[in-house]
Image (cartoon, rainbow, N blue to C red):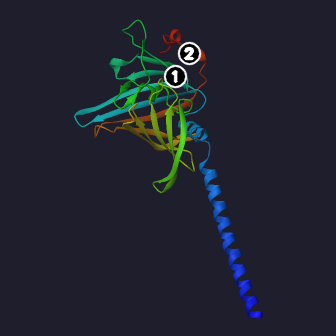
Amino acid sequence: MKTAMARYLILKSKILATTFLLLSNITSSDDLRAEDALDPVQIVAKADRIRFPQEGFKVDITITTTNPDRDPEVREYRVLSKGNENTIVLTTAPASERGQMMLMRGRDFWVFMPSVSQPIRLPLSQKLTGQVANGDLARANFSGDYTPHLLRIEDVDGKPAYILELIAVDRGVTYPRVLYWVDKVTNRPLKAEFYSLSNRLFKTCRFERYQMMAGEIRPTQLVMEDALKKGERSVLDYKNLEIRNLPDKIFTKDYLKKLE
């Protein structure tokens, strides 16, 4: 009788232990699902705030484009931006194009050239130089322009990262579809893949050289590479980022002529 009772107690303890482990696994799975269900809009917004300040700011950008068949081409710009709706891009080099200015209000984009009396309206998706589109300088944030979906979490260089699919809210934005990698711990953007309307990969981007700028560790270099033509790429180097109080009135066609 005692032996049977002992066996019963041992069996009961094993059943309880197994049940506990199963419940623990279920809880862990629920926690993982809850973690994976994080709002993708917030993930993208946090990454955007790391890339650039929410306040008005000024930044200088040097774009170096390399091609196996040509000498490197270097262009320099000064960008004044406020939110994701108002941006002025001033061309500072080469000297032959100095004085050329670009204005973005909402998704309207104009180019002002000293030799032309009227501004020219262009799409944000049109190429500015090398692998860089107008929207890459004028409208650099993804928030508001795309509907994000969290696809999965995977390791990138040994660290977990969110992989998000960004679908353009309309045809006025720079890219129809983007795959976006964001560090799960720091919310720093890592890389992006840009797709055409036919869902063909045509350009990739890496966010590199994180340094302190305007009170935040931000990527100071973007490397954009042509996915179709090997060896063609543009490197964007950011410097002199400063928070600026930029009144709305400067983001108008009439005010541009007052800028030096």
**Residue at image location 55% in from the left, 23% down from the top:** 85
Residue 187 percent across, percent down from the top left: 56, 45
- Up-down relation of residue 171 to residue 259 (above or below): below
The residue positioned farthest toward the top in the image shown: 117
Disc ID at residue 87: 1
The amino acid type, in three-letter code, at marker 2 is: Ile
Q: Mark 2 against mark 1, which lies toward the viewer?
A: 1
The residue positioned farthest toward the left in the image shown: 69
Secondary-structure class at tag 1: strand
**Residue at image location 52% in from the left, 24% down from the top:** 80
Disc ID at residue 121: none
Disc 1 crowd rating (10 Å Cα; few below 14, some 14-19, many 20+) is: many
Q: Mark 2 points at which residue?
A: 250
Q: Are marks 2 and 1 in contact (CB under 8 Å)?
A: no
**Residue at image location 62% in from the left, 42% down from the top:** 39
The amino acid type, in three-letter code, at marker 1 is: Thr
Disc 2 crowd rating (10 Å Cα; few below 14, some 14-19, many 20+) is: some
**Residue 242 located left or right of residue 116:** right
